Structure formats: C-alpha cells, structure tokens
Image: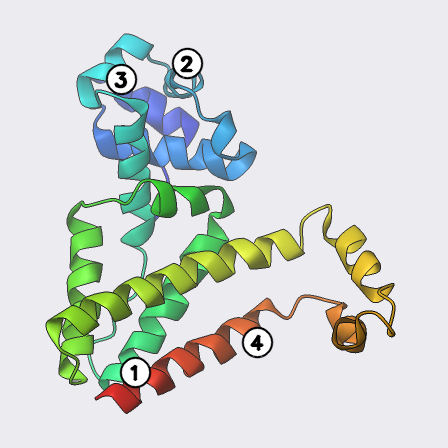
C-alpha cells in the first residue's frame, strides 16, 4: 500500500480532508525512517503540517494511531484463494514475515499491542478457517493460530537482531567458545557467518505444519 508523501499529506490537511488513514500512513513512514521511538505526536503533527490537538480529533491516543499503523501493514499480507490448507497457511505466514521485515520498526506493535481492526480480523479468521479445514478442533485451531503468528513475529525479531550492529560481536564470541567446555556450541560456530534467517524460518514453519498435519 503506497504511503502518503509529506507534501500530499500536508495538502490534505489544508483541504480539510485529513483522516486516520493518512495519519497512519505518515506515522508508518516516520517509523520506517527512524524507528518506533521517532514517532511522537509532535513529530507526526509537524510532518502532516497540522497540530497535535488536530490529531486528537482522529485518535484519542498514540496507541490508537499505532493500532491503525498495524492495520495498514497487516492489510498487505496476501491471502491466497486456492490450494491445500497447509500450503495456503505457509503462504500467509511467509507473507506476514515479509511485511514485518519490510517494516522492522513495527515488530513490537503486533506483540505488545495486538490490533483488532478489519484487516487483522480478516487475517485471523482466514488462518482459523484453514486450520479448521485441516481437521483441527476449534480449541486446537486457536492454539495453532497463536503458535504460527508467534513464530512469525518471534523469528522476524530474532532475524533482525542477527543482522544488527552487535550481531558480529555475538558471532565472534560464539566462534571463540572452547571446544572442550562447549563442544556442541563450538561445532556450529563456522555456520554462524552470514544471514540464514530465511532458511531457518522455512525449516521451522515446515516443522510446525508437519506437526499440525499429524494432528488432523
């Protein structure tokens, strides 16, 4: 979904057509550029060419704006129309991870502040429906949905951490582990180079889906 440019957003304020979607698009751009801490009501108002008090006409709190931002991102997850239930689930989870990677500053929103707007409800409903189609009972479908989404959010956060500024120091430390004291850790040391988070995610996702297939 294209985000409103600063000039376009400010123009809409002048025309009196500001709405929560434009506010959320602008907030998302700020987060993408500077991280979640860069988003303040004052910064957002300045970017929109508006005032903080005006923003409160559309959202009572910053958390409501963050929820709207989360909805924008969740709406980008592709939901396939055809295919087996497990193949469609795999596509959805890969898509969820892709949009989270595209907006790394948003990872904490989905974990600490779950959204319940139309896009989130549609995605949740589709996941539950596919799990039910796979033969899981309603309680187990709910548990499996939580496992899958938690896995997507968690592995995305870990993958981003492994390519952060401190990641190389971590890898160097692990590669220096004593083979006598930590033989298994030392054995994987040579495999720590580079970013294999995509491969790791795919492996874990297939392990989860394999387990779900055995439950059906």
- 57 shown above or below 74: above
Query: What label does residue 42 carry, if any?
Result: 2
Mark 2 element type: helix
Q: Earlier in the sequence, mark 4 or mark 1?
A: 4
- Relative vertical location of residue 191 with respect to residue 109 in this rendering, above or below: below
Residue 74 spot, x, y in % from top left: 30, 52
Query: What whole-number distance in Å separates the C-alpha atoms at marks 1 and 3?
Result: 45 Å
How far is disc 4 from disc 2 in space, using C-alphas? 41 Å
Mark 3 or 2 closer to N-term?
2
Q: Residues within 10 Å of mark 3 (few under 14, many from 20)?
A: many
Q: Residue at x 15, y 85 (%)?
A: 135
For label 1, the residue is: 212
Q: Position of residue 89 (x, y in %)?
A: 29, 75
Give the residue at mark 4. 199
Distance CA(mark 3)–CA(mark 2):
10 Å
Q: Quadrant of residue 133?
A: bottom left
Q: Mark 2 or mark 1: which comes first in sequence?
A: 2
Foreground residue among 135 and 140 = 140
Q: Are marks 4 and 3 in contact (CB under 8 Å)?
A: no
Q: What secondary structure is marked by label 4?
A: helix
Q: Earlier in the sequence, mark 4 or mark 2?
A: 2
Using the rendered image of the protein, determine whether residue 2 is visible from the camera's viewpoint.
Answer: no
Say which of marks 4 and 2 sits in front. Answer: 4
Determine which of the numbered discs, if any, sits on residue 55 in the image.
3
Q: Is residue 175 left or right of residue 204?
A: right
Which residue occupies the foreground of this view, 69 or 167?
167
């Amino acid at each position: 979904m294209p985000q409103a440019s600063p000039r376009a957003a400010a123009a809409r304020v002048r025309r009196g057509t500001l709405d929560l979607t434009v506010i959320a698009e602008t907030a998302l751009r700020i987060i993408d550029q500077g991280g979640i801490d860069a988003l303040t009501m004052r910064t957002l108002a300045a970017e929109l060419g508006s005032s903080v008090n005006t923003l409160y006409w559309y959202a009572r709190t910053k958390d409501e704006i963050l929820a709207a931002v989360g909805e924008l991102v969740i709406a980008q997850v592709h939901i396939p129309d055809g295919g087996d239930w497990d193949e469609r689930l795999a596509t959805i989870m890969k898509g969820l991870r892709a949009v989270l990677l595209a907006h790394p500053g948003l990872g904490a929103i989905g974990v600490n502040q779950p959204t319940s707007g139309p896009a989130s409800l549609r995605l949740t409903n589709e996941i539950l429906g596919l799990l039910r189609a796979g033969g899981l009972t309603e309680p187990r479908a709910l548990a499996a949905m939580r496992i899958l989404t938690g896995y997507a959010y968690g592995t995305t956060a870990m993958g981003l951490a492994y390519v952060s500024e401190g990641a190389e120091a971590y890898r160097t430390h692990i590669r220096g582990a004593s083979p006598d004291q930590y033989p298994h850790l030392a054995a994987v040391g040579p495999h720590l180079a580079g970013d294999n988070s995509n491969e790791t995610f795919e492996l874990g996702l297939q392990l989860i889906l394999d387990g779900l297939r055995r439950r059906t």
